[in-house]
Image (cartoon, grey):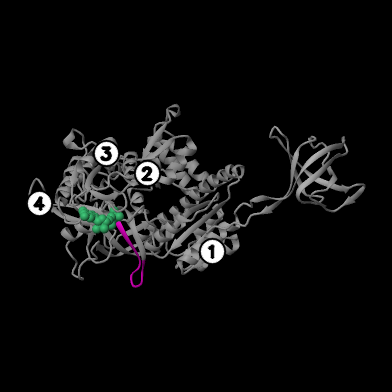
């Protein structure tokens, strides 16, 4: 700690003092940024940034890199608004700016995600493109689902040349995450699919909004044009109404009319993607150290932790030392998406890698390092940053809790760990479908792979239960969990796990009471009304009344007064019960504002049995 502080001091002693009155209001930040670059962008002295990091338990020297989330927390503390860089080109040129040499920039394939409303044909289109353009591997063709693949097409400008397009094939809402993860935009272009016989639906609008926010261009594919009830004009009109004016109508949205089922128009769509990417002038520097993002990961019986990564910049080679989130290793196996061995993977290339110590998380960044030692140190630093994030999550959680006590909303926090992406998605889907009534069910964290110590630390900070679905719990994690009082629940059957979550929710359901009416009656006379007692004469029209029961008086103007029965008298004698039809004296809480002629109800509160189903 001492050493790096001294080093920092000397590093920034020769830089020009900053005019702190000009601290930036807001900054755009790439996925990874050096302290120096963050200082330059925000105009906050590097020493201040370093001390903010230190306050949060992160040690970083001036030339060291921090990730987007950490930078965002520091910016927040410094009062600087911070958002991820939106232009992919900028991400490339700004990332590790000291290393990027503009001369090295070369065109790279576009990365495309197909999105749209359910049943509009996303899966069919991805299958059609894959079958028509992906060369089957020697191992017998692609039958399994793959989360990313590349297609090779003739260049529209030069038929002798080939052009590549990378498709990200992630199901459902994972596609949204694929669009943005840790401040990076994985997707260059979104193909928005709209069924010609259906039209723009809620999820279509969601995608349009998402792309607008993230400044990702949309190409529209109007699908199912083979159907007799297809109405292409209606869809184009709806698109215009939602800010996507087709090119042929004077707008700038490329629209292709296709049948994903028959393949009609699909080549035009692919050409439109190439045209758009040409216009976007997408570039990367293959000479740089590799930088990528995890789009799928799981434990492979033979190869150990496996990850499918999309290389965003630089080139990943077999034997490279790498860090991905909190894990690290050496690229022992490098394959293309088709499971064919390759020596290197360049920008926009999906690559399967083995050689990591642990299973990385979807959306984590891959960074290559000169040697394994540095990769390991980087993963340890990442862990420190995770602790910082946990501290922030805790802060947020505390303020959430304050607000919630006021609103009397109870919350169940959970962390889900699962064996593979498919089961994690399935669990999350079922969790999201639980009808929680007035409770809040929050998935504080999720991931693939064994329950790690940092999962336990996060659970402790956010008062969460850890649900481990078909994954082991590291012995060290068990120990920490026991010490910290964190509960780890292990399941092999998905519905048993969902039932347990429902049981936990039921346990924290606020108790609700309803009134059971025991008797009804009328006040006939006022006997006594002073500081010590309030006694009325009354008659019951139905039911029976006993001392200590609650009673509610209703006046003619609709006002209601509540009290409780102190004692009951029948003629001169105290009694324990009054039945209907008899006149009696009723002593109430002193000061109860009752009048002759008020009707009343004797009632008791009964607990309502409730259950989260
Ligand atoms: P997703 O939910 O968006 O992935 O939609 P799917 O690809 O699963 O398609 C939903 C249904 O529409 C399936 O029954 C497909 O066979 C059908 N479908 C998809 N594309 C076309 C098309 O171009 N024409 C016709 N007639 N049916 C299609």
Residue range of the region highlighted in magenta in the rendering: 299-309
**Which sits earlier in the primary sequence, circle 1 or circle 3?**
3
The crowding category of the residue bearing disc 4, from other C-alpha atoms within 10 Å (few below 14, some 14 to 19, many at least 20), is few
Q: Residue at label 3?
A: 238
Q: Nearer the viewer, residue 400 or 408?
A: 408
Label 2, on which residue?
33
Q: Secondary structure at mark 4?
A: loop
Q: What residue does disc 1 label?
A: 488
Tell me, yes or no, whether the two marked residues, 2 and 4, touch with CB atoms within 8 Å. Answer: no
Residue 400 in picture, x, y percent from top left: 55, 44
Q: Which residue is mark 4?
A: 161
Q: Are marks 1 and 4 in contact (CB under 8 Å)?
A: no
Q: Secondary structure at mark 2?
A: strand
Closer to us: mark 2 or mark 3? 3
Left or right side of 177 for 282: left
Question: Which residue is situated farthest in the right direction here?
Answer: 572
Q: Which tag, 2 or 3, sits closer to the chain's start?
A: 2
In front: mark 3 or mark 4?
3
* Structural distance between the alpha carbons of marks 3 and 4: 38 Å
Residue at left 44%, top 53%? 381
Mark 1 or mark 4: which comes first in sequence? 4
Q: Nearer the viewer, mark 1 or mark 4?
A: 1
Principal secondary structure, stretch drawn in magenta: strand
List the single residue furthest toward the front. 581
**Which callout, 1 or 2, points to the residue nearer the camera?**
1
């Amino acid at each position: 700690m001492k050493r790096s502080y001294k080093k920092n001091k000397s590093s920034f002693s020769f830089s020009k003092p900053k005019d702190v009155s000009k601290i930036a209001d807001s900054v755009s930040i790439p996925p990874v940024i050096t302290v120096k670059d963050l200082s330059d962008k925000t105009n906050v002295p590097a020493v201040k940034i370093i001390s903010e990091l230190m306050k949060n338990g992160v040690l970083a020297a001036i030339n060291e890199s921090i990730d987007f989330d950490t930078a965002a927390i520091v910016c927040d503390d410094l009062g600087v608004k911070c958002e991820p860089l939106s232009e992919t080109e900028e991400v490339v040129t700004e990332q590790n700016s000291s290393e990027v040499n503009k001369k090295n920039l070369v065109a790279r394939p576009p990365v495309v995600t197909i999105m749209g409303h359910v049943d509009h044909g996303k899966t069919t289109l991805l299958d059609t493109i894959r079958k028509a353009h992906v060369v089957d591997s020697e191992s017998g063709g692609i039958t399994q689902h793959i989360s990313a693949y590349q297609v090779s097409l003739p260049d529209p400008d030069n038929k002798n040349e080939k052009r590549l397009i990378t498709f990200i094939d992630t199901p459902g809402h994972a596609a949204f995450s694929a669009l943005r993860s840790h401040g990076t935009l994985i997707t260059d272009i979104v193909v928005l699919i709209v069924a010609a016989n259906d039209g723009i639906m809620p999820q279509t609008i969601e995608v349009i909004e998402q792309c607008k926010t993230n400044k990702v261009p949309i190409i529209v594919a109007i699908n199912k044009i083979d159907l007799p009830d297809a109405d292409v004009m209606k869809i184009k009109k709806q698109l215009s109404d939602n800010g996507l004016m087709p090119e042929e109508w004077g707008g700038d949205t490329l629209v292709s009319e296709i049948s994903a089922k028959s393949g009609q128009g699909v080549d035009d769509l692919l050409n439109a993607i190439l045209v758009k990417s040409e216009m976007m002038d997408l570039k990367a520097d293959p000479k740089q150290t590799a930088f990528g993002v995890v789009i799928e990961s799981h434990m492979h019986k033979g190869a150990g932790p496996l990850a499918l990564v999309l290389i965003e910049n630089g080139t990943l080679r077999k034997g490279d030392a790498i860090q991905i989130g909190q894990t690290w290793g050496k690229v022992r196996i490098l394959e293309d998406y088709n499971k064919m061995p390759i020596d290197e993977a360049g920008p926009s290339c999906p690559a399967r890698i083995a050689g990591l110590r642990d299973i990385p998380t979807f959306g984590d960044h891959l960074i290559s390092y000169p040697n394994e030692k540095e990769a390991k140190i980087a993963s340890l630093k990442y862990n420190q940053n995770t602790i910082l994030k946990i501290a922030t999550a805790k802060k947020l959680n505390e303020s959430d809790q304050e607000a919630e006590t006021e609103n009397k909303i109870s919350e169940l926090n959970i962390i889900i760990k699962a064996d593979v992406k498919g089961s994690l998605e399935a669990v999350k889907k079922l969790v999201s479908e639980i009808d929680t009534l007035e409770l809040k069910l929050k998935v504080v964290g999720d991931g693939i792979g064994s329950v790690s110590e940092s999962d336990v630390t996060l659970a402790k900070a956010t008062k969460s239960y850890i649900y481990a679905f078909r994954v082991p719990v590291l012995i060290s994690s068990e120990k920490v969990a026991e010490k910290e009082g964190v509960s780890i629940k292990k399941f092999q059957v998905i519905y048993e796990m969902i039932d347990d979550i429902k049981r936990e929710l039921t346990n924290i359901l606020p108790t609700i009471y309803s009134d059971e009416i025991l008797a009804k009656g009328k006040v006939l006379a006022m006997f006594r009304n002073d500081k010590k007692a309030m006694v009325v004469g009354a008659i019951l029209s139905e039911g029976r009344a006993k001392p200590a029961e609650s009673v509610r008086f209703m006046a003619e103007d609709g006002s209601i007064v509540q009290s409780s029965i102190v004692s009951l008298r029948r003629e001169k004698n105290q009694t324990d019960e009054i039945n209907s039809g008899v006149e009696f004296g009723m002593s109430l809480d002193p000061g109860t504002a009752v009048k002759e002629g008020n009707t009343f109800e004797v009632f008791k509160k009964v607990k309502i049995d409730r259950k989260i189903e």
